[in-house]
Structure formats: structure tokens, C-alpha cells
Image: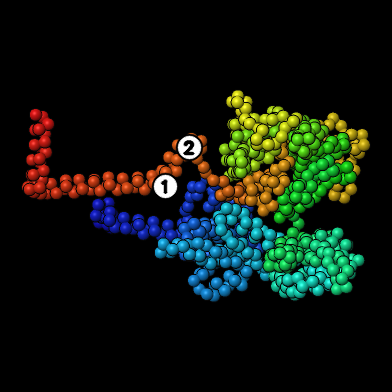
Amino acid sequence: MKKIIEWFKSSASDFVLFLIFLVLLNFVGSNAYVRADLTKQKSYSLSKASKTIVKNLDEPVSIRVFFDKNLPAQYSAITQYVEDLLEEYKRAANKNFSVSFMDLSKQENQDLAANYGLRQVQIQEVNNNEIGVKQTYMGLAISYGDSVELIDPITSSDGFEYTLTSTISKMINTAASLETLRGDDKIKLYVIMSSSIKSLRISGVDTLEDSIDKICREINKQKMDKLEYTVIHPAVDEVAGYTERYGVQPINYRNANGEYETGCIGVVVEYGEKFVTLPIQIQDIFFNNYAVVGVDTAEEDINSAIQSLISKPTQFGYIVGHGELDLLTDEGAKGFNTALSELYELKTIDLNEEDIPASMKSIVINGPKQDMTEEELYKIDQFIMRGGNVLFLMEPCQEVQENNMFYGTMTTYTANNVNIERLLNKYGVSITKEYVMDEQSCQTYHNTYGILDLYWAPLLQKEQMNEKHAITSNLANVVMLQTAPLEVTENRNVKETVLVESSDKAWTEQPDGLMLNPLVITPPEDASKLSKKKLMVLLEGEFESAFDQAPVSSDKEDEGQGDYTISSHLSRSKQPGKIIVAGSSQITTTQVFAEDASSGVALLLINAIDYLNGNEDLCKMRTKGVSINVLNTESKPKVTFFQLFNEYGLAIIVLLAGLIVWRMRVKRKARINRFYNPDDDRFIENDKKDNDKKSEAEA
């Protein structure tokens, strides 16, 4: 035993111990999972919401991934990201979560992808110096129970985690809602079409009913046979009722007798008192050649409609009755409404006729242009005192149409003074009746004048966003259209957070006589007039009421009607609330707010709604990978230098490093040769030459 101990202590055992160490290290490494996400946005780490969903799965969720392994570099990076993130899901999930990566080199897997309904993506690739086109799959299919949802195509890593997590969440909620439906409680699917339309020989009309019937049967396989299909052929005198109720498409045409009559066509999904009209219509597709469009996406649209009808999304109020932007028109906030409808249900509230429901967490006030009554203001104030949250999107100026004898009708602006600002002033925010202009703005091109700056549409980047807050973290390219500057009064009970501000080259313009024309607006020559402006702020904490007591007509003690409550006067907040104020309501219009929520300002506002409703994790998840790191320099020579350095600099550095290493190896080799072979004639001759050079130099 002593010999063994002595052997371990001696240097003779070092090699054996080293081998044992390597074996143990390899064993630990194969069973331990250690990784570090060094990306600033934590793009390769799951958010808390994603981990919670997959960790608490009660039923199996199966994901089949269909990605070609032989993709060009720009797409292979997406493939790798999807694989890495799905591995994170697997590690965070319980036993009910599984992922399969399908080998698309096998024909049966290609057939499976086609059966799921995945669409092939056409991509360009270079082979043997020739540019070719390749058809491939880049998507995945999610199975939960009998239902299947697709994420297809996946051509970008932006927002992938948010899309996947929200899809799984919707599938779980939809399945749970379907199970609660009684046996005779069905979701209705209507094809509403006047019989005489079939005689018009419009492409797709004859097959519409059979196509929807086939889709209905396929969906019923996934939805527990809860979808009931009905074809309705309305009489001529019933057409107006269907178009008014469901918004189906009216069509004027001549019937077989040569008389004009009105028919209608449309597909509607209805449950209870709610319905969704699908975008299936007759359109002129080519020089008076009419056809039914929208049938190719009908299955996806019907599934989405079912989810929206039977799920129970969080409600938030949308105050109306004072000139606020309309949720249903293109000129209003239609895009805002559409983008939010996937997660929330906007309930319009006319405070002159009803109270804010006690169960509602948040409301939106979007561009009021008329004064409210004292009772209406009091309802908003007391909602905040009870811990309610409000998003104020204010309109600093109103448009005025003026007739000019030289230029015709001109649009000018005047201050929009509304009494709801009295509440904001009390809570600590004041709005200046001016428009913020910013040299860092959107641009347009004019054939005569070239590139023109739209100073009233500041284009804000990461530097103008509060990167430490969930609402604005990772955001960029946010257009704050026609916005006013905000001023905040300090309050020790309220925490102020500036979410968005202008660049340091911003100034303000008074509305009187202002024309938003890039040819007449110029930055001030005095640089001292340029400064940063606060454009969106968040207030959190306990607020003081703007009322000393309730207005006389509203001073009712302890009344309640069902879900609605009118409480006694509260002079201070009973629990902390949140108020977000922005100096523009134009940011909810289709000018800058994309219905698909792809624009920067759309992400900003949806994040704001999420934050007010306590869904902070969704904010961080949605904006992963959205912003781009750019150079913070305005010098064109510097920009050119960095561009050339990124293109050629690294290659040159590697080349120089290689040359240096090569020369060092040559010298090292020469030293070794000289040491072991000092009598080599080459070394003697070189030494002689070196001595001759030294002698000449000394002479």
C-alpha cells in the first residue's frame, strides 16, 4: 500500500493521473450542459413566459421541423438559430414537449410537409459560378391534440420565439375552450351567396360551397366536430339585412330577365353574438375578368376566426365620443385595432352612457378633440385611483382646411385644447401645443427637388429608446409622427421613466399658420434652439385625484350594477397604477402603424399595452432581434473607412499575421540549425557577410 501511495506522490504517476483527469472531464462534459448567451438581446435564451408554458404542459406538444440542410449561407444561419432555440425549449420543457427534425432528402418527409400544408420557398443559390433557383421547405408544424398549426415560412429569426410561444399558447387555450362547449353548442360557418350570382359565370363561384364544405370537414377533425356548416341563399329582399349585419360583399348585376338586382357573397364564422367575416370576395383580377379570391387561405382564416371567437382575450377599454380616432376606418386607428385583436379585445366605452367595468385593467384614450363632461373626467380619474392603467395618446393640434385663391384648399393647424389635459397636469405631465421637428427624420424623394426631409416625422433609433425598459428595449426605426413635447413634474410618490425621446437636433414649431411642407420648414440657424425632447413617458406609483370631491350628479355612494361599479370618492390611489403618455395619436394611423405589427411604432404601442396589462415578458420576447447595431458616426470619411475595413481589413490582418508567423518560424528554424550544426558553410558565409557590412559601416 505504501508503494502505491509513494508512486502516486512521485512524478511517475503524472501521466496516468492526467489521462484519468481527461476521462473524467469528458464524462462530466457529456452529461453537463454549460452555455453562455453573449448576445446583448439574449437572442439565444428563452424568456420566462416561454419556459412557463412548456414546463407546465398537460398534453403532448409535438413539433416537426422541415428545413433543408443544404441552404445558402444567409438561410443556414436561420436554420441554426431555429435548431438552437428549439433545443432551449426542450431543456426547459417537461416530458410532454418533443421536437423532430425531418430529413428533407427523403421523399416521404417532403410528402409529409406538403400534406401539412407547408409552402415551398423559392431561394437563389450559386453553384459552379451559376445562379440557380431552388424550391425548399422552411417551416414547422405544431401538433397539440387533434389540432395542427403551422409557422411557415420562417425566413427570418426575428420574433421567432414570440411566434412559437404565442402559437402554442393559443392552441392550448383554443382546445380548452372547445372542451367547455356543450354538445349542442356549435360554432357556425356560413356561406352566404345569392343563388342568381351563379349565373354570372364568375370564376370560383360554382365551386365555393363545395370548397368551404371540404375545408369544414378537415377542420372538424381537429376541432372535435364543433363546426357546423350552413349554406344560405338569401332572397332579394334579405340581401340588405345580411350585408348590414355581417358586412358581406354586395354585388349589383343584371339577372336572367335583364333587370338590375343586388345580391351578396361572403363567408362568416359566428359564435354566440360574435362573428368574423372572412376576406373571401369577388374581385376584378384582369380587365373585367372577375373571380372569387381568398379561398386559398380560407382554412387558415377559419382557424384564426375560431380562436378569436371562443378564446377569452383580455379586454381593455377604448374611450369614444369626443372625436377620438375611429377603430374601423383606414383614416383612423384600424391598423391599431387589427394588430391588437390577436391578443386583446378592444371594448369601446362611451363614458357619457356607461362606466368603466370594474374588471377592466386598462383603457386607451386616443386623440380626443372635444371636451369631456365633469362626470366623464371623474370616471377616468377614479379608475386610476382604483389602480387602473391608462394609455394617453394625445393630439396637440387639429387640422384646419382653408381656401386659398392661389393654392386652393390648404391644411393648416391650430392648438387642440381639451380639458382632459387637466387630469394629466395633476398626475404630473403637461403637453406643449407644438409639433416636434427633428433633423433625424423620415425622408421622401421628389422628382424635382430630390431628397426631402419630413421633419415632423422623427425617425428614432436605439439611442433615442430607453434600452433598460421592457417596452422600448431592442426597438429601433420608430416614427413618432406629428408629436408634441412632454414636460414632467417631479413627484416623490410617482416614478417617471422616459421611454422615447427625440435626437439632440430637434426643435418645435407653433401650430398657428404651420404647413407641414418640407419645402417651407427649415431647421433653426441658432444651434442653441436644438435639444432633446421627451416624446413618451411612463408614470408608475400612487397618484393624487384631480377632484376634491365627486361631481354632484356622480356622487352616489356604494352603487353597483353587475360588472360595473361606481365607488365613493377616492382622493389617492388605493394601489399603484401605470400611466403612459405620448404626444401623438397619429402614430396609431396606417401612415406609420402596419396592421401586421411589423413597424417600429407598432411594436412600441403593442408593448405599451402588454406592459399595462402585466405582460412584461411578451415585450422582451417580441422585440428580440428587431434592432440593428449601427455605427454612431456622421462623418462620411469615417463611414467609408469602417466600411472598407469590414470588407477587407480582417483579411489583411489575417494575411499580415500569417506573414509574421512564417518569418518567426524561419528564424526559429535557423537558430536550431545553427545550434546543432555550427560548422555549416551557409552560416559561416552569412556571418562573414554580416561582419563585412559592420566593418563598412564603422569605416
Asked if residue 678 lies left or right of residue 59, the reply is left
Question: Along the line of sight, which residue is nearer the eye, 609 or 324?
Answer: 324
Task: Give the residue drawn at x 63%, y 46%.
Answer: 600
Q: For mark 2, what is the residue? A: 636
Q: Is residue 495 visible?
A: no
Corner quadrant of residue 28: bottom left
Report the Cα–Cα distance between label 1 and label 2: 17 Å
Q: Secondary structure at mark 1?
A: helix
Residue at the (63%, 52%) spot, across then down: 49
Disc ID at residue 348: none
Q: Is residue 435 left or right of residue 107?
A: right
* Count of all numbered marks drawn on residues in the image: 2
- Residue 284 image-quadrant placement: bottom right
For disc 1, the marked residue is 647
| Foreground label between 1 and 2 | 2
Please, what is the three-letter code of the amino acid marked with disc 2? Lys
* Residue farthest along the right direction in this orientation: 553
Lower sequence index among marks 1 and 2:
2
Q: Is residue 592 above or below residue 303?
A: above
Identity of the residue drawn at 85% across and 73% down: 256
Quarter of the figure that contains the C terminus: top left
